[in-house]
Amino acid sequence: MGVSIIIPAFNRYELTAACVESIQFHSPEHEIIVIDNGSTDETRFAQVAIRNETNLGFAVSCNQGARAASNEHLVFLNNDTLVHQNWLAFTRHLHRPDVGCVGPKLIYPNGRIQSAGVGIDFDKTPGHEAWNMQSDWTTEPAEVPAVTGACLGIRKELFDSFGGFDVTYWNGYEDIDLCLQASHAGYSNIYDPLAKVTHLESQSGPERWTAVEANVHRLRTKWSPK
């Protein structure tokens, strides 16, 4: 079954080009949808599926990509990633009707684990309620509170039923919100350590950090039990 791989991009053309090249090498049979969020570098001359005049942010551009997708399964992928052989193995869990969001093991270029699923605890200090688990705590696929949007899979039908990513977030916590929506609706979120993606992390520039407090407030207001 085909997968639509959705990659939002804002400048840093060299990262996007390397990401797409790695996908084409390891999984050329799948659809790639690149959304240019108003880039001013070489990205604006590249062949992209959707081009925005301004930077509309992660949530909006991913939702645009999802609407354009032709496959049943969606994978949202940051442009500062490099995929490995059999990296899409984690999407096999999407065939289970009880599964919501899925994600692979994310590693840094030096091989250290960047994310082995995401933990969530609203009793922690605001801004620390969600964190990447960074150890080989499981060797088999396992249920987790959330997976990171750096590489996140979901069925298109389910994503659409949630209304896509919540666009009131700006480049932060959209992924956690989506996973919480899935959990709240009775679905399990799955981390699969058997699939691997290298993530350079936070290479998109200062725009990534312009709404941290607002994102935290939105997430806690919407989901914290207190």
Image (spheres, rainbow, N blue to C red):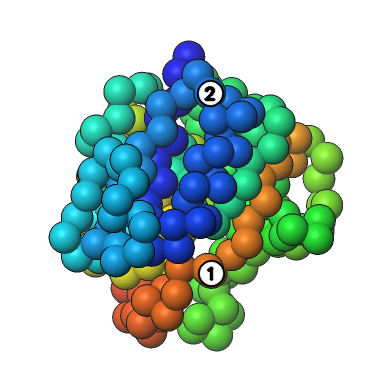
Q: Nearer the viewer, mark 1 or mark 2?
A: 2
Closer to the camera, 172 or 47? 47
- What residue sits 71% from the left and 31% below the top? 85
Residue 140 in view of the camera: yes
Q: Quadrant of residue 9?
A: bottom left
Q: Residue at x 63, y 28 (%)?
A: 26
Q: Residues within 10 Å of mark 1 (few under 14, many from 20)?
A: few
Q: Quadrant of the C terminus?
A: bottom left
Badge 2 marks a residue whose secondary structure is loop
Q: Amino acid at mark 2?
A: Pro
How far from the left and from the top, in percent, is residue 186? 44, 39
Q: Are marks 1 and 2 in contact (CB under 8 Å)?
A: no
Q: Residues within 10 Å of mark 2 (few under 14, many from 20)?
A: few
Say whether residue 97 is visible: no
Badge number at residue 28: 2
Q: Of the numbered discs in the image, which one, if any, rests on residue 202?
A: 1
Residue 109 position, x and y percent, is 74, 58
SS class, disc 1: loop
In percent of width and height, residue 211 lies at 34, 80
Q: Earlier in the sequence, mark 1 or mark 2?
A: 2
Placement of 119 over or under 18, stated as above or below: below
Disc 1 marks a residue whose amino acid type is: Ser
Per the model, the C-alpha gap separating discs 1 and 2 is 26 Å
**At which x and y percent is residue 68?**
24, 33
Q: Which residue is located at x 53 percent, y 69 percent?
A: 202
> In the picture shown, does residue 207 fall above or below 18?
below
